[in-house]
Amino acid sequence: MDYKKEALLRRQIANFTPFNEDERKIYLKKMEKNQLKDYYEKERWYNYVHGIPPFDIEQRQKDYALINTALKINRTFSNHPFCKIIGDKRKKTNRPVIYAVTHVGLYDYQMITEAIGDQTFALAGDPEIMYGTFDGFFMEKSGVIYCDTNNALDRYVAEKTAIKYLVHGANILLYPEGVWNLTPNLLVLPLWPGVIRIAQQANADIVPVAIEQYGHSFIINYGPNFEITNHDINDLEYIDLCRNILRDNLATLKYEIFLSKRCIKRSKIGEYEEYLKKFENTRLNEWKDKDKNPIYTLDLVKSRTYRESDKNVSDLVGEKVLYASPIEAFNFIKNLSVSKNNAFLLRRDFSMPKSIEMDKEEKVGEIIYTNSKQKEKVLKIS
């Protein structure tokens, strides 16, 4: 228990009194978004400090069958009718379960909620966006623990609330990446260490789940249960080890999804930057506000990516990036021994994108890239 945060929480709610049912019907409808955000945040803190669960576990579990049926009907008549499970290595356990799911976009929550086959409480950010919406109503009926990811106290309360649910027999669904993965080639973003701390304190299994979206279709891959054996939340080395193992497991599950798909010819992709931009815009435009503007921007997604405390680790918002740049990806050409079996790697389709900025003329293998003219010349392929 963090006694400083506990004391601060009590001070923050000292003058707060939650509405009763009649007052909620009157006053909540009149509030603006920022007022609702502040009220619900204080209410979450009040409920936590006073030991009041915001939702009834048994009722949510009873509602799951109806929710799941509604999800199937909605998927059938929506633009996302197809969801395929290519692997399921889960094992039955008497422990509560944390489903740690990769995050690809707006619709993966609906797909994974249906596919899991069991009621879960989702740990979700951006609660102010969900207030007063159908999606918000659906999440509340399904079971949700809201959290303002930019607020340290709210993150603390969400983590402790998730532990309480698990201890009382509920299962949790969370996205340890914390945000949509829109990087060009990083399989899994750095993971939030809270997923390990929650499992430690609730004696819960972690089930890694990878999900990928291809057009209107989704593919899901479940990994085996990941058991936590050390329950000392002060053992940071162990937490970091488990976090890295979990990330590796998720990356493996994603790679298995990639292998299950037919290969795409590079010539079908087109120019790197154009393809990347199309991918980013497709995801960002899935979720829009009432004025039809994207709720998420690329800068917002990058700023919310979990950042390692080690200054030597690559960082999306720093000078380095979390993913391999095209220059790094094609650096292998420097050491390539060209033969008839690999000469195709030097074709234009496999060379670096034309718009890659370079500080000076650089020779990669037998290809020269110039910054001034932004083009490359194949001098020799033999």
Image (cartoon, rainbow, N blue to C red):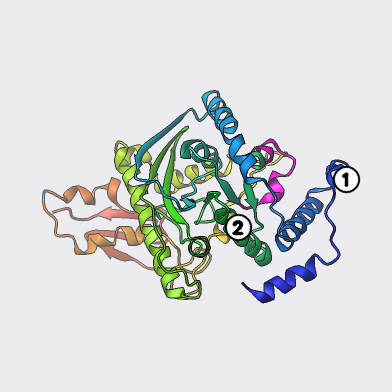
What element does badge 2 sit on? Answer: helix
Rendered location of residue 305, percent (x, y): 53, 60
* Cα–Cα span, label 2 and label 1: 28 Å
In the rendered structure, find residue 348 and report the number of the disc placed on it: none
Is residue 62 at least partly visible in the picture? yes
Q: Which span of residues is magenta-colored?
A: 124-139
- Residue type (three-letter) at the residue carrying disc 1: Glu
Give the camera-side residue of 312 and 348: 312
Left or right of 367? Residue 160 is right
Q: Which residue is mark 2?
A: 164
Q: Is residue 109 left or right of residue 248?
A: right
Q: Tell me the residue at 57%/59% (across/down).
A: 163
Closer to the camera, 380 or 28? Answer: 28
Seen as rendered, the residue at the extreme top is 77
Tell which of 242 and 332 is nearer to you: 242
Can residue 287 be seen here? no
* Residue that label 1 marks: 23
Mark 2 vs mark 1: which is more N-terminal?
Answer: 1
Instruction: Look at the picture and state if 49 lies above or below 265.
Output: below
- Main secondary structure along the magenta-highlighted residues: helix
Q: Position of residue 13 (x, y in %)?
A: 80, 65
Q: Assess disc 2: are there few (<14), some (14-19) or many (≥20) residues with their C-alpha within 10 Å of its C-alpha.
A: some
Residue closest to the eye, 141 or 126: 141
Taking the spot 49% from the left edge, 69% from the top edge, the residue there is 308
Identified by mark 2, the residue type is Lys
Q: x and y percent of residue 240 in the render?
A: 43, 69
Name above or below for residue 307 compared with residue 57: below
Residue at screen point 23% across, 59% down: 333
Q: Quadrant of the C terminus?
A: bottom left
**Mark 1 element type:** helix
Up/down of 34 relative to 9, above or below: above
